[in-house]
Image (cartoon, rainbow, N blue to C red):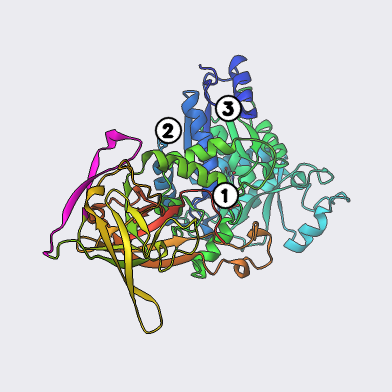
């Protein structure tokens, strides 16, 4: 048994766990992460993963991965596989075997029979419309179903018939007999089982009745010995039902049975967390897939270059509370940037290239090799070799024919600039095409100014990046902006109407030759441009922009 580790911020859930352990309610804690395999995981799920698996780690307890697979029509093995992969990538591992709610279908059935035998559940033949009418409203109590007072024997036989497939879909449901006048709507005789003639990815065609979430979840928790069942705030009312089921089943009505606690869900600005809506973006081909780097999915963020450590750090920064709010995207990006700033090797890439010819450099085709630091603040990361020669590429935005103002620190005609890790050059002239676009820049270099630091006493403030032209390797750059133009797209009637049409910009430029060996997903800082990683899907050399160097919401 251990206390809350000091370095972790206290939150109300940790307080509850500390108190439970102090009272010896449990020997150790056991949490679970219970995704429904009906889509890919998003950053909201990451918060829940970090909470559940993180608590288990910190308290030396256990955390199960449980697929909450009670709704066969929406679920698929593709999602099961992606969820396993995402949890592991985030740096967590589940205790024991993977759990499936569907493993407990026999038990759920027996527990439903127990409730029937106790006169606490009945088969109801009201149709959907009648059921709605009988339920009442927040202001008005509901009415008892005419099927409510049938005997346990009758209900047992009816439920067996439901299981045997003798009723058509929608004909009847099994309901708990609780209180049709309860102020909490979910206590008004909620459904426990419905009929679905659907193939299930784990149980095949063995079942044609499937349990409802509220019934299945608490029992799954109890079977697995979960101590603290953490879920989001919209399940607050359902906690009554959670407790009611466990209180009325002999196997579980014990002091160490699980308890449910709710925390606020993560909402992120300029994106959305609803799996259904994310599904729609994928199905309507408005993004490249679930792992499109603009998606708020774990696989999308991974492809974008976010590291698992930065996502865990983000979860820590937003913390756990009971207050629903929108989280500023800048908080996520700051966590990503802070991680990359320390860990990303530096390199140079020219995203919008224009050629510069160094007129006083030998014309014999000679290329020189220069050692440049991999990380300016971390010598232990070593050096890399870059090249310099008569022809180089710089970024179009780093040259103006006429220096536009005093603040301009880049290259212009008759204005010197330092090339990062190399020489000072001075602009001499430029060629233009028929439309007046600059096509080639000419410059001279000062051979006495080679050095990675501006220590040569020359008053040249501006530093720009470059790549030597003959060694440069062509690369595609994918620059991302927020996916939506409004802070809370989920609130819109038609969220597709507020998609940002400029959320992806593709550029073709050049990178240092060593980057042909870049490992996909490994973050690099392209000096002065931002953090990028090599795309994990493309066959060619493609770099996804992860995040800018500073917090700027462009546009
Ligand atoms: P959706 O409503 O979009 O389908 P969900 O909550 O139903 O999402 P599940 O697969 O059931 O998705 O979620 C698994 C776990 O992740 C649940 O415990 C749920 O509370 C948690 N979770 C889902 N979304 C968020 C979120 N935005 N913030 C924090 N936790 C979340
Ligand atoms: Mg859910």
- The residue that mark 1 highlights is 329
Q: CA distance from mark 3 to mark 2?
A: 25 Å
* Spot occupied by residue 379 in the image (x, y as percentages of width and height): 29, 34
Q: CA distance from mark 2 to mark 1?
A: 32 Å
> In which image quadrant can residue 554 be found?
bottom right
* Spot occupied by residue 88 in the image (x, y as percentages of width and height): 40, 41
- The residue that mark 2 highlights is 95
Whether tag 3 and tag 1 are in contact, CB under 8 A, the answer is no
Which range of residues does the magenta coloring cover? 364-387
Please name the residue shown 46% across and 58% down the image. 408
Q: Residues within 10 Å of mark 1 (few under 14, many from 20)?
A: some
Whether tag 3 and tag 2 are in contact, CB under 8 A, the answer is no
* Spot occupied by residue 481 in the image (x, y as percentages of width and height): 51, 60
Left/right placement of residue 380 relative to residue 284 reads left
Which circle's residue, 3 or 2, is located before the other in the chain? 3
* Spot occupied by residue 76 in the image (x, y as percentages of width and height): 46, 57
Residue 9 is tagged as 3
Q: Is residue 412 above or below residue 84?
A: below
Secondary structure at numbered mark 2? loop
Secondary structure at numbered mark 1? helix
Q: Residues within 10 Å of mark 3 (few under 14, many from 20)?
A: few
Tell us which disc is closer to us: 3 or 2.
Answer: 3
């Amino acid at each position: 048994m251990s206390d809350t580790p000091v370095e972790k911020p206290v939150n109300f859930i940790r307080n509850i766990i500390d108190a439970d352990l102090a009272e010896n309610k449990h020997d150790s804690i056991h949490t679970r992460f219970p995704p429904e395999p009906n889509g890919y995981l998003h950053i909201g799920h990451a918060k829940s993963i970090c909470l559940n698996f993180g608590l288990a780690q910190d308290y030396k307890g256990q955390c199960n991965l449980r697929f909450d697979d009670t709704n066969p029509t929406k679920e698929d093995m593709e999602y099961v596989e992606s969820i396993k992969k995402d949890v592991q990538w985030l740096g967590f591992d589940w205790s024991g075997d993977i759990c499936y709610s569907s493993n407990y279908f026999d038990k759920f059935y027996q527990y439903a029979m127990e409730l029937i035998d106790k006169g606490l559940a009945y088969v109801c033949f009201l149709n959907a419309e009648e059921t709605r009418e009988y339920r009442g409203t927040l202001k008005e109590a509901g009415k008892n179903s005419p099927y409510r007072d049938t005997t346990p024997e009758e209900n047992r036989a009816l439920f067996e018939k439901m299981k045997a497939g003798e009723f058509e879909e929608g004909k009847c449901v099994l309901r708990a007999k609780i209180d049709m006048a309860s102020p909490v709507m979910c206590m008004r005789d909620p459904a426990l089982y419905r009929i679905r003639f659907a193939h299930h990815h784990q149980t095949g065609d063995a079942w044609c009745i499937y349990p409802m979430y509220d019934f299945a979840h608490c029992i799954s928790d109890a079977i697995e010995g979960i101590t603290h069942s953490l879920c989001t705030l919209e399940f607050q009312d359902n906690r009554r039902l959670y407790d009611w089921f466990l209180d009325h089943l002999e196997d579980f009505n014990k002091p160490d049975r699980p308890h449910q606690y709710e925390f606020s869900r993560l909402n992120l600005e300029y994106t959305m967390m609803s799996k259904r809506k994310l599904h729609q973006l994928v199905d309507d081909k408005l993004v490249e897939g679930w792992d499109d780097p603009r998606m708020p999915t774990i696989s999308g963020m991974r492809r974008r270059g976010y590291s698992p450590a930065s996502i865990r750090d983000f979860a820590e920064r937003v913390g756990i509370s009971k207050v629903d709010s929108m989280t500023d995207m800048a908080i996520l990006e700051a966590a990503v940037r802070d991680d990359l700033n320390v860990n990303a090797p530096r390199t140079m890439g020219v995203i919008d290239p224009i050629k510069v010819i160094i007129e006083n450099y030998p014309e014999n085709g000679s290329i020189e090799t220069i050692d440049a630091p991999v990380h300016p603040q971390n010598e232990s990361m070593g050096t890399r070799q870059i090249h310099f020669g008569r022809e180089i590429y710089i970024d179009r935005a780093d040259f103006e024919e006429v220096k536009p103002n005093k603040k301009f620190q880049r290259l212009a005609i008759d204005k010197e600039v330092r090339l990062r890790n190399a020489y000072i050059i001075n602009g001499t002239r430029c060629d233009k095409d028929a439309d007046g676009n600059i096509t080639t820049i000419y410059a001279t270099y000062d051979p006495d100014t080679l050095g990675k630091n501006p220590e040569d006493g020359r008053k040249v403030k501006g530093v720009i990046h470059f790549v030597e032209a003959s060694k440069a390797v062509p690369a595609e750059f994918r620059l991302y902006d927020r996916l939506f133009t409004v802070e809370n797209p989920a609130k819109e009637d038609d969220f597709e109407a507020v998609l940002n049409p400029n959320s992806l910009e593709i550029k073709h430029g050049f990178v240092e030759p060593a980057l042909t060996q870049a490992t996909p997903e490994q973050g690099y800082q392209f000096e002065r441009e931002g953090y990028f990683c090599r795309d994990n899907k493309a066959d060619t050399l493609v770099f996804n922009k992860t995040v800018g160097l500073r917090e700027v919401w462009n546009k």
